[in-house]
Amino acid sequence: MTKKIAPLFKSTDEQIEPLTATITGDIPKWLKGDFLSIGPGVFDIKDFTVNHWCDGFGVVCKFSILGDKAQVTFTKRHINSDAYNKAKTVGKPVYTEFGTKAYSDPSKGFFSKIMNNVLPELTDNETNCIYKLGQTIYLATESANKRTLNVKSLLSEGKVDLTDTMKINLACSHVYFDPDGTGYTLGTSLTSGVKTQIFKIEPKGCKPGEEFKNATPLCTLPSRYKTSISFSHSFGLGEKQIVYIEQPLFMNGMKLISMTMKGKCMWDTMEWKPEEKNRFTVVDKSTGQVSPVIYESDVAFFYHHLINVYESNGQVVVDVMAHDSPEVFDRLWLKELRKGVYALKDKPSARRFILPLLKTEKDLMALP
């Protein structure tokens, strides 16, 4: 890939005053609302540059659409997270990011620094996902810290720590929804033993910003390891089933706990074990019952997102956008991207897996 991509990885400025777009074609008159997006966009703090594209501090963008006036305006703001505000003060990140280690926070006292080395605070640098749960717009990353957003000002109005409400340390970036607004997400606890659970969130009747207080564990998912966690950015939600894919990119629990003390980044805690393959777990969405049958792929693959999950003729069809390996992470180092180099060899492809609905492994004998 040529150097034409290099300008895409500069730090972006804010656009606080609405910028009116030039319209080509027609906008439907009935179309009215705000389209929001989120992603990393601030890579340089004073004289410091983060290492990885995923480490960039979050930027939220808004396209405000008024179809009856044939008008679209654009605004964007840096997300006023604790991670970003402290980095601006210190001149370096003080929370561990994906590819950049945490630096000392001078605002912390001696004992606070010791405690942070033992039980490190996780970042609230939200760059991965934006969603509406109940009455609240949330900004999300893979930690248990989520932030709420004021859509009018594009400022975050608060941080929601899911370690308090759901007793988890890591939470996948996505919440998926039923038509009635019920949400589902996935979280992992480290402090009470490594445990990954799917949570059901019923936001009706909640005050804005308190929707996660109504989260209840739907089930606990099986895992091959007691001290390592499969990297889980998302899962699959169908009408009747939830599908969780444990992939062989594992975060070593002991490395996670010691990463701040040892000056390591999140990527340093991860281990790719392709000999372990991928394991599919099917959960009954209405009861939370976990199928005792574990389905395993022929070869290992890495994925961020599922495309679709649905039931057909007594089988669950699972479509995944997958790579053969997590090489994509190693192609997002900012130093190379700013040279215009993005030499990804392991391109993603859509892959379909068909899982027969079985009560026990013995039921396989009944299949034609």
Image (tube, grey):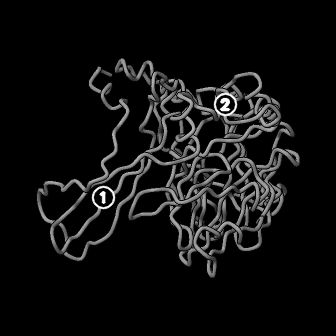
Task: Name the residue: 53% across, 24% down.
Answer: 330
Asked if 218 appears above or below 127 in the picture, the reply is below
Describe residue 185's horizontal placement relative to residue 252 as left or right: left
Name the side, left or right, on which 10 lies relative to 120. left
Residue at numbered disc 2: 106
Name the element at disc 2: loop
Q: Position of residue 5 (x, y in %)?
A: 31, 27
In this picture, residue 361 sits left or right of residue 7: right
In the figure, 25 relative to 3: above or below? Answer: below
Tell which tag, 2 or 1, sits nearer the viewer.
Answer: 2
Q: Counting residues from the N terminus, which is met first, the one under dot 2 or under dot 1? A: 1
Q: Is residue 221 left or right of residue 126?
A: right
Task: Tell me the residue that label 1 is attached to.
Answer: 63
Residue 32, percent from left and from top: 28, 72
Which amino acid type is shown beneath numbered disc 1? Answer: Phe
Q: Quadrant of the C terminus?
A: bottom right
Can residue 54 be spotted in the picture?
A: no
Residue at screen point 53% across, 60% down: 157
Residue 294: in sight, yes or no? yes
Q: Quadrant of residue 104?
A: top right
For the view shown, which residue lies furthest in the bottom direction?
Answer: 205
Residue 49, placed above or below residue 223: above
Task: Answer with the quarter of the image where residue 258 lies.
Answer: top right
Q: Residue at x 50, y 64 (%)?
A: 137
